[in-house]
């Protein structure tokens, strides 16, 4: 691995232009891509947060109260708000990407992309309504 590569006429050197570390700031589409990739960190945080919540609930009332007091700290609240924004961005970009990622055919005819994305948004709205109803009104 440490041996030096020898370049010959059959193996010319590659010409590589220097790329800035911040290449992704040049175009909006690059920035959107990087933000989508970054959002997976916040999705992971939410999963860990929910697992810690389940663990606190399973260990009794005192542990649950400790978790609630920890969750009420400004830093944790700020992290959860930022995470919520990134998770919504992650979901929206995924729903917009779904028609490109999968081809659905009904009777030999391709289903238009807006119907696939629209059905995802409809399912999200319905699930949100059910959760809201359970939390607020049931």
Image (tube, helix red, strand yellow):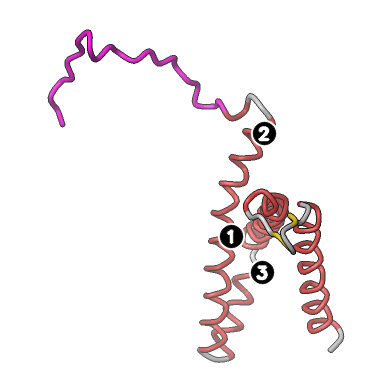
The residue pinned by badge 3 equals 72
The mark that comes first in sequence, 1 or 2, is 2
Q: CA distance from mark 1 to mark 2?
A: 21 Å
The image shows residue 77, relative to residue 66, as above or below, that is above
Which residue does the image show at 62% across and 46% down from the upper left? 36
Q: CA distance from mark 3 to mark 2?
A: 36 Å
The residue pinned by badge 2 equals 29
The image shows residue 35, relative to residue 57, as above or below, that is above
Q: In the rendered structure, find residue 43 and report the number of the disc placed on it.
A: 1
Q: Give the extent of the magenta segment.
A: 1-23
- Mark 3 vs mark 2: in front: 2
At label 3, counting other C-alpha atoms closer than 10 Å, the crowd grade (few under 14, some 14-19, many 20 or more) is few
Which residue does the image show at 70% across and 60% down from the upper left? 105
**Callout 1: SS:** helix
**Callout 2: SS:** helix
Q: Position of residue 10 (x, y in %)?
A: 22, 12
Which residue does the image show at 83% across and 75% down from the upper left? 129
Q: Quadrant of residue 77?
A: bottom right
């Amino acid at each position: 691995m440490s041996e030096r590569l020898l370049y010959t006429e059959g193996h010319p050197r590659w010409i590589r232009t220097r790329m800035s570390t911040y290449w992704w700031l040049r175009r909006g589409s690059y920035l959107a891509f990087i933000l989508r990739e970054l959002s997976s960190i916040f999705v992971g945080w939410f999963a860990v947060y929910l697992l810690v919540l389940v663990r606190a609930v399973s260990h009794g009332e005192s542990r649950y109260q400790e978790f609630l007091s920890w969750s009420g700290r400004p830093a944790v609240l700020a992290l959860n708000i930022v995470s919520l924004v990134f998770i919504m961005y992650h979901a929206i970009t995924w729903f917009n990407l779904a028609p490109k990622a999968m081809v659905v055919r009904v009777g030999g005819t391709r289903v238009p992309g807006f119907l696939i994305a629209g059905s995802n948004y409809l399912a999200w709205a319905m699930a949100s309504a059910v959760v809201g109803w359970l939390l607020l009104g049931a």
